[in-house]
Amino acid sequence: MLGLTEEELTAVRLSLKVALWATAASLPLGVLTALVLARGRFWGVSLLNGLVHLPLILPPVVTGYLLLLLFGRQGPLGSFLAENLGIVFAFRWTGAALACAVMGFPLMVRAMRLSFEAVDRRLEQAAGTLGANPLWVFVTVTLPLALPGIIAGMVLCFAKAMGEFGATITFVSNIPGETQTLPTAIYTFTQVPGGDEGAVRLTLISVAVSMGALLVSELMARQAGRRLGTA
């Protein structure tokens, strides 16, 4: 693959693994949060919206440091998870996935929220008058209609996870084979003499993966739209 070294291949595989896990782990909570923000009418909705989008406003290094304080081995959540569930985030690939999920979550929620807001509520009401309970209405009416936006949100989260640097390197450092993803590997190559070729190779891989993800999401969104149009 483009003459990649074993170290570079490891960084590519780890980046894909981290991005996929970050996207998959964020999806259920992302759908729920987007639905609440789109339909919720309670006093704390503005506060929730601000908290969700906070990672977009804060410097990534600050987000990574906050994750280190909370989920580090000495942090309140990190020590609890390590002692009771055996889950360790600090300086592990799981921590990289967590950091990427946090950074990509606002983009995922925003795309999904806009999609939920565009759903015609009259179709949901019609399903309800036919005897469907709210959960069944959501699964059979709301979710399919919002599917293009859900796909777009997943792709945005995946792309953000593939390119995340600041929060990841602050939270889990840059350990080859464990936490060194594509962006941190590129950064490492730019800091050493003769590393330009490796940086260029990984940059091309990063661009190719991101473009591929966008093309796949576009095809899936169009297919979902055609199915809804013929339903």
Image (cartoon, rainbow, N blue to C red):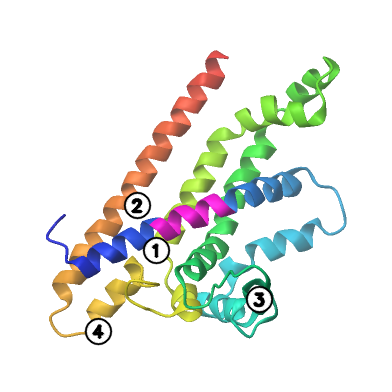
Contact between marks 2 and 1 (CB within 8 A): the answer is yes
Alpha carbon separation for disc pair 4 and 1: 18 Å
| Neighbours of disc 2 within 10 Å: few (<14), some (14-19), many (20+) | some
Alpha carbon separation for disc pair 4 and 2: 24 Å
Camera-side mark, 4 or 3: 3
| Neighbours of disc 4 within 10 Å: few (<14), some (14-19), many (20+) | few
| Neighbours of disc 1 within 10 Å: few (<14), some (14-19), many (20+) | many
Q: Earlier in the sequence, mark 4 or mark 2?
A: 4
Q: Earlier in the sequence, mark 4 or mark 3?
A: 3
- Measuring from the top left, give residue 158's x and y in whole percent: 45, 53
Indicate the amino acid at tag 1: Gly
Q: Which mark is residue 210?
A: 2
Label 4: which residue? 191
Q: Which mark is residue 163?
A: 1
> Which quadrant: the C terminus?
top right
Picture residue at 58% right of the left edge, 74% below the top? 58
Picture residue at 49% right of the left edge, 64% below the top? 97
Indicate the amino acid at tag 3: Glu
Q: Earlier in the sequence, mark 3 or mark 2?
A: 3
Q: In the rendered image, which quarter is residue 131 located in?
A: top right
Alpha carbon separation for disc pair 3 and 1: 32 Å
Alpha carbon separation for disc pair 4 and 3: 38 Å
Picture residue at 47% right of the left edge, 33% below the top? 221
**Is residue 24 part of the magenta span, yes or no?**
yes
